């Protein structure tokens, strides 16, 4: 057999193998289940910008911009999980934790510091012990228990097994219900956007998938807006997500990589119309993380 023919057959077989390997449909496992004692190392960079305008009736508007950035490297050990297998309490061993504000960069916590994190009734991650304001803010940006915004099987996974590189649209009612579980008022939400699934590099012989998402939900009231929500009239409220997550098909492994850009844009008024205070809030949160599973 000539060398040219051998090369042609080899290339043909390789193409066929690749084609058939990617021709199958995949179920997307968004809600991974963790166990007590499970450990991983996480490296995360996160940046937050909050822009507020508060304009009391008949008074000048008060404007404020707050920027913050955290760069973290830590080991996480799961201490407790809920019935769905999501971590609700964890031990965080700091390898490096820096916090950047307009005033400068500080070491929020020294290496080898150990902090206990737990999930409260509102789904927010809280940290135990006496911590400085910089440490609290850096940890808030760097560590999140429970599940990330896209880790909701009912809301974001395709209804049936799907081929790679296929986009699917989402059920707006299910997305609204997911946001309500995250603390949003979303009973009148309107949804636009789609998701797509692609192949990703394997992790220690475990096949992984990459989920990309870009969507917008309008007509929502974000959590933590402050004040009595019953007195708050929403004019415009929008929640935007531009993200990707790399997930192993093995649901007992943690997500290996993720990148999120979340924008919450809200305007409204609080109080009686004749004396209402106008409120405008824009919060943008970007983070990127890489995870390395560790032996228990």
Image (cartoon, rainbow, N blue to C red):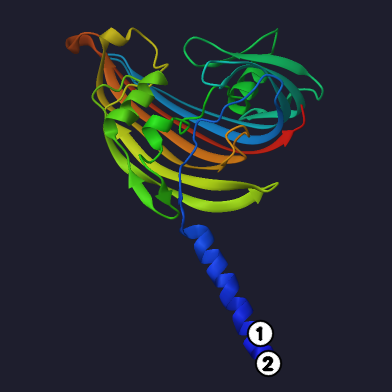
Q: Quadrant of the C terminus?
A: top right
Q: In the shown orientation, is residue 70 left or right of residue 230?
A: right
Q: Which numbered tag is attached to residue 67?
A: none
Give the residue displayed 68% in from the left and 48% down from the top: 205
For label 1, the residue is 6
* Residue 277 appears anywhere in the view: no
* Residue 71 appears anywhere in the view: yes
> Given the current orientation, which residue lies at the most extreme right position?
112
70 up-or-down from 131: above or below:
below
Q: Residues within 10 Å of mark 1 (few under 14, many from 20)?
A: few
Q: In the shown orientation, is residue 119 left or right of residue 60?
A: right
256 up-or-down from 237: above or below:
below
In what element is the residue under mark 1? helix
> Given the current orientation, which residue lies at the most extreme left position?
274
Distance Cα–Cα, label 1 vs label 2: 6 Å
70 up-or-down from 88: above or below:
below
Give the residue displayed 31% in from the left and 33% down from the top: 217
The image quadrant that residue 215 belongs to is top left
For label 2, the residue is 2
- Image coordinates of residue 103 in percent, x first then y, are 64, 27
Q: Are marks 1 and 2 in contact (CB under 8 Å)?
A: yes
């Amino acid at each position: 057999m000539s060398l040219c023919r051998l090369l042609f057959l080899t290339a043909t077989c390789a193409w066929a193998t690749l084609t058939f390997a990617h021709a199958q449909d995949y179920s997307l496992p968004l809600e991974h289940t963790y166990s007590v004692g499970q450990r991983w190392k996480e490296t995360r960079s996160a940046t937050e910008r909050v822009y507020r305008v508060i304009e009391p009736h008949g008074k000048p508007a008060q404007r404020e911009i707050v920027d913050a950035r955290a760069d973290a490297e830590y080991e996480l050990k799961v201490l407790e999980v809920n019935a769905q297998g999501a971590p609700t309490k964890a031990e965080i061993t700091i390898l490096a934790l820096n916090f950047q504000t307009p005033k400068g960069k500080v070491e929020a916590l020294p290496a080898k510091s150990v902090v206990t994190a737990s999930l409260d009734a509102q789904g927010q991650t809280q940290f135990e012990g006496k911590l400085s304001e910089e440490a609290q803010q850096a940890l808030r940006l760097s560590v999140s228990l429970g599940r990330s915004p896209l880790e909701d099987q009912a809301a974001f996974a395709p209804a049936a097994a799907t081929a790679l590189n296929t986009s699917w649209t989402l059920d707006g009612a299910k997305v609204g219900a997911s946001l309500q579980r995250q603390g949003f008022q979303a009973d009148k939400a309107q949804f636009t956007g789609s998701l797509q699934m692609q192949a990703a590099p394997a992790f220690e012989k475990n096949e992984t998938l990459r989920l990309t998402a870009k969507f917008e939900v309008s007509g929502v009231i974000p959590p933590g807006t402050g004040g009595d929500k019953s007195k708050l009239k929403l004019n415009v409220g929008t929640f935007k997500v531009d993200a990707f997550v790399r997930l192993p098909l093995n649901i007992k492994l943690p997500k290996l990589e993720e990148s999120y850009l979340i924008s919450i844009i809200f305007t409204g008024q609080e109080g009686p119309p004749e004396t209402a205070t106008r409120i405008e809030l824009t919060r943008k949160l970007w983070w990127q993380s890489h995870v390395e599973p560790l032996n228990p």
